[in-house]
């Protein structure tokens, strides 16, 4: 899971094989939002980020179960 200022990207992997089961992303959160999920795109007005996450998780395939979640955090450092 990787959240940016106006986007969310996620990938779901099988373990231990580490095959990618699903990739999805939301771009333009708070503006012209586009959701890309399972090879298709959906224009959907979503804001803020929690609405986009709820939308993504509610549209996961029924046979996908999440055992753990990792989130990428990037710190800009001292200014």
Image: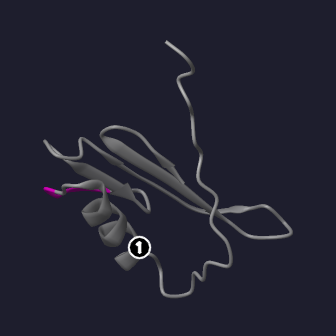
User: Could you tell me how many numbered marks the image carries?
Assistant: 1
Instruction: Give the image quarter of residue 68.
Output: bottom right
What secondary structure is found at the residue carrying circle 1?
Answer: helix
Q: Position of residue 69 (x, y in %)?
A: 62, 66
Is 37 drawn above or below residue 31 in the view shown?
Answer: below
Query: Coloring scheme of the render?
Result: one colour
Instruction: Give the image quarter of residue 37.
Output: bottom left
Q: Outermost residue, right direction?
A: 16
Q: Outermost residue, top direction?
A: 79
In this view, the residue in front, 50 or 16, is 50
Q: Position of residue 39 (x, y in %)?
A: 42, 57
Give the residue at x 40% y 49%. 8
Q: What is the crowding at mark 1: few (fewer than 14 residues within 10 Å), some, or many (at least 20)?
A: few
Give the residue at x 60% y 83%. 65
Instruction: Give the image quarter of residue 60.
Output: bottom left
Q: Position of residue 50 (x, y in %)?
A: 31, 63
Main secondary structure found in the magenta portion: strand
Give the residue at x 13% y 42%. 31
In this view, the residue in front, 68 or 13, is 68
Is 17 drawn above or below residue 34 in the view shown?
Answer: below
Residue 3 shown left or right of residue 20 in the figure: left
Is 33 drawn above or below residue 42 in the view shown?
Answer: above
Disc 1 target residue: 57
Residue 42 shown left or right of residue 14 in the figure: left
**What is the span of residues highlighted in magenta in the rendered image?**
41-45
44 within the magenta span: yes
Is 72 drawn above or below residue 70 in the view shown?
Answer: above
Q: Outermost residue, front direction?
A: 78
Which image quarter is the N terminus in?
A: bottom right
4 within the magenta span: no
Give the residue at x 57% y 57%. 11
Residue 26 shown left or right of residue 67 in the figure: left
């Amino acid at each position: 899971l990787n959240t940016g200022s106006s986007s969310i990207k996620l990938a779901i992997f099988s373990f231990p094989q580490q095959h990618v089961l699903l990739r999805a992303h939301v771009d333009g959160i708070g503006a012209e939002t586009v959701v890309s999920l399972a090879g298709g795109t959906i224009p959907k007005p979503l804001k803020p980020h929690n609405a986009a996450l709820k939308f993504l998780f509610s549209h996961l395939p029924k046979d996908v179960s999440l055992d753990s979640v990792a989130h990428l955090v990037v710190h800009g450092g001292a200014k």
